[in-house]
Image: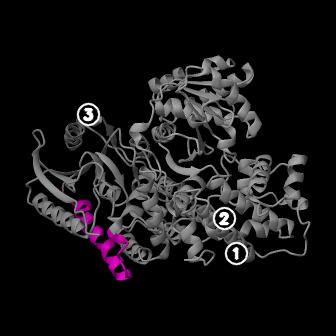
Amino acid sequence: MSERITRALVRDVPLEDLGTLALVTLDNGEDHRKPNTLGTEGMQGLGETFAALRARAEAGEIVAVGVTGKPFHFAAGADLHQAVSISSKEEGTAVARAGHDAYRNLLDMPVPTFAYVSGVALGGGLELALSCAYRTVATTVRNIGLPEVAIGLIPGWGGSYLLPQLIGIEKAIQVILTNPLANNRQLTAAQATELGIMDVALSPADFLAESLRWTARVIRGEEKVTRAEVEGEEFWAAAVAEAGKKVQARLHGASPAASKAVELLHLAGEGDREKSFAAEDEALGELITSPEFAASIHAFNLTSSRARKPAGAPPADQARPVKKIGVIGAGLMASQLALLFAQQLKVPVVMRDLDEERAQRGLNFVRAEVDKLRERGRLSEAGANRVMSLVSVTTDINELAEADFIIEAVFEEIEIKKKVLGELAPLVSEESIFATNTSALSVTEMSADLPHPERMVGLHFFNPVAQMPLVEVVRTPHTDDTTYATAFAVAKGCRKTAVAVADRPGFIVNRLLVRMLGEVLGSLEDGTSVADADAALRPLGLPMGPFQLLQLVGPAVAQHVLDTLREKLGDRYPTTPGLAQIVEGGTPFVHFEGRPSAASPVNEGIAEFFGSGAGNAETPEELLARVRDALAQEVTLMLEEEVATDADDIDLAMIMGAGWPFHLGGIIPYLKRTGALAA
């Protein structure tokens, strides 16, 4: 693919009575849907521009340099379409050096330099801003970060050195390692300012003019910009060592980029800029031709392009406006949904439960979460008050009658769900849409007794709702286009990635995760040790292992879903006497602080409940092969059953709903690379 060149357009701007500021505007000539990216030709032009400005600064012609972007975009980093065509380490190293050479002119500019971050600033775009002495950001910017590790690379244009030198090693580890490995979490303007990456956040209404006025105050000395003191050598080394242990515990070497980033962060502690830059050159040259990078780009393309235009979704203009939402239930899942709808859709939401105590508990949960968001600066005082004003609870089912969109989130039992939907159906408008948040049950069966089954759809959100980006949108044979389009519109309004799925047991994510869990538990029954079973899947680099997953969903829920899928899909979803004993006995697992991860401890005590087939133990390598074969079988069946539109939607669902790592490139490419699935 040919490069969409981002050009550096320069104009002189009078800076009050101080002299001339040279303002560089990055612009690829496209609208806001196509962000500024930096390919070979664009970077060459940028380097030439900064070199010319350095000469002007040395000649005393300008008093400052400013860099900004087009509306909504500063720069989204390297041109990844061009990067995937690089075929040699030497070529990759040259790309890294070109970036360093261009940005070095900014770093060594003899006059103050300013980045005015008007929009998205990711990867090489953020590194460009870091190469300036000062940074302003528009308060509306939501995408700031160094996501390279998530796609099999490292910050290769100065980020691994410049960021920790600016904000300290602990915060830099968060941005360079922790966030990319947490579903590529990115920073808002407020968060970046709090971390010290940005110096000041300004209103977008008059952003450039305000940035120039702020620039003048800085140059005059009227505005003092303070920097956090960078930690000492001993603290720095200890922080990087701890980060390295966490990376190893989670990924077990499955992501070379993460390990290389740890090395670069350690090197940055020496304070030698040029040595760090040379190491970045070398690292980028190696990684850009790696299979992990190629796999990551496949995953990146799915999550950045296909996620925006869900396959199988009806035209958006067929969606019905949603003005009031009813939530059946006020438990944990229902309360999370109520908060999401009120915060993102900004419509009234009423939760209904059977008694006042349960209903009030749900409202208290929403209030506590809103308080947390306000304390963290994610919601203003006014915003928090607005969200709470939109959420109410009741025990009276009649108060849901005026809702035009109703979602049930009660116990995962088909008869209970049918009962509550049946009670509500006669009370609501004939245009009201029903949705279920079921994770595995038949939406068709659930809607069978409703007077209008065409107005029923599945809308499966994942727990925790605020963090998990996926929604599986389930269509029954009866669901009409208006209902289906409205479900996609609700998902989009909630800032979630929607994937169309057929009404088959477990849909995509739970069907595959439970199959995987069933194989692991089956191996325990055959005599495999808990330690070996836990170690078996570590080479995948999954966000959590099978036992942490079991802890997260709960043994009782896991058994219920396993039983449901076995009933519907057959004995390849096994019975597990050990799991049944754990559920019956209420055996506790290790308590995790917060959400479990791959590095969370495993309760070895559960071993006593398994081993009925002792003597047939598997090695970790054998169990991994068993799991791969099982997943390959299930994927093949799902494609035959047309559970998803195509293979890409299965990959997308597993990436967004199960945290399937980018460096594996999606579950299907991984199974093909390992030979479990025919290429």
Look at mark 3 in the image and give the residue it sits on.
Answer: 205
Residue visible at 68% across and 38% down in the picture: 446
Task: Give residue 70's position: percent from left, percent from top.
Answer: 23, 48
Task: Give residue 619's position: percent from left, percent from top.
Answer: 77, 76
Q: CA distance from mark 1 to mark 2?
A: 14 Å
Amino acid beneath label 3: Ala
Residue visible at 44% across and 45% down in the picture: 314
Look at mark 1 in the image and give the residue it sits on.
Answer: 625
Q: Which quadrant of the figure has residue 138?
A: top left
Look at mark 2 in the image and give the residue it sits on.
Answer: 634
Does dot 2 land on a helix, a strand or a loop? helix
Quarter of the image where the N terminus is located: bottom left
Quarter of the image where the C terminus is located: bottom right
Q: Nearer the viewer, mark 3 or mark 1?
A: 1
Residues at circles 1 and 2 in contact by the CB criterion of under 8 Å: no
| First to last magenta residue range | 82-110
Q: Which quadrant of the figure has residue 578?
A: bottom right
Q: How is the image coloured?
A: one colour
Q: Nearer the viewer, mark 2 or mark 3?
A: 2
* Residue 594 marker: none
Q: Nearer the viewer, mark 1 or mark 2?
A: 2
Q: Magenta segment, principal secondary structure?
A: helix
Q: CA distance from mark 3 to mark 1?
A: 57 Å
Q: Residues within 10 Å of mark 2 (few under 14, many from 20)?
A: some
